[in-house]
Image (cartoon, rainbow, N blue to C red):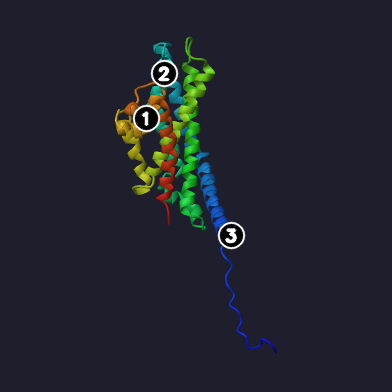
Amino acid sequence: MAGEGAPVAAVQPLPPAEGHPRRSAAALLGVRLGLEMALSRLRARRPLLALGLGVALAVAAAVIEVAFGSSGAVDRALLATFRLVMPLTIFALAADAADRTTLREAAWPAARFGASSHHVALGIALAALLSSAAAGALLAAVVVAIAHGPGAAPLARDMVTSGWIGALTGAAYAGWFSLGATFLRRGSGRFVPLVADFVLGGSAGVVGALLPRGNAVNLLGGPPPLELAQPASAGLLALSAIVLALAAAARCRE
């Protein structure tokens, strides 16, 4: 029969045309799993209590400042809240998003079923950023609503301005705490940026420009680190939140 002795052509594998879309879909799935897992942790009793305590402390700061005098009460109450209440509240939320352990271990419940720990960790870090931004905006808005007095800027404008500053600051803190959670046992490295911000965050040098507190104070009308303009401080807060979250996820690669 014709062609009987002809060699059979080797079957070549199809080019991986769908490799890229499949990898992208797997990455998005991992991020979504991490996001959903962290948000479910943040709906638990402990983080909600931490947020409630933060709001109560912000209210107390506003009431105390109003009692000392309505003139400038909003500015004083905001500075007190941004310097103490906000970092502590965001620290608690970021820790609970990572299940009070390292970021890699927090990603394991989803990663053990095949999802990339890097992408799951990114989802957890993003959940921490989003929830912290919302918490920061809430704390700032509550302070303005209570401490607002006659002669101050219009309430709605003050709340919106303070709210977006609180959101940027909260997200930046969450980025630092997420990266810190990739170091030391049970993620206790997250304490390092917290302590550094308390001790050095108000400095006028490079450290003050890198940490959230100095840039937040600048946006609230206080002394700027490195003589930065307010738009530069806002950009640094936003950039640090994103870059630190990506760096934290990168440290969780397999």
| Relative height, residue 2 to residue 147 (above, below) | below
Q: Which residue is mark 2?
A: 75
Position in image of residue 250 (x %, y %): 42, 50
Position in image of residue 87 (x %, y %): 40, 32
Q: Are marks 3 and 1 in contact (CB under 8 Å)?
A: no
- 27 vs 135, nearest the viewer: 27
Q: Residue at x 40, y 48 (%)?
A: 102
- For marks 3 and 2, the one nearer the N-term is 3
Which kind of residue does numbered mark 3 sit on?
Glu
Q: Residue at x 45, y 32 (%)?
A: 168
Circle 3 — which element?
loop
- For marks 3 and 1, the one nearer the N-term is 3
Which kind of residue does numbered mark 2 sit on?
Asp
- 212 vs 68, nearest the viewer: 212
Q: Is residue 84 left or right of residue 113?
A: left
C-alpha span from label 2 to label 1: 15 Å
- 94 vs 217, nearest the viewer: 217
Tag on residue 213? 1
Circle 2 — which element?
helix
Q: Quadrant of the C terminus?
A: bottom left
Mark 1 neighbour class, 10 Å CA radius: few under 14, some 14 to 19, many 20 or more: many
Q: Residue at x 46, y 53 (%)?
A: 117
- For marks 2 and 1, the one nearer the N-term is 2
C-alpha span from label 3 to label 2: 55 Å
| Relative height, residue 8 to residue 128 (above, below) | below
Tag on residue 18? 3
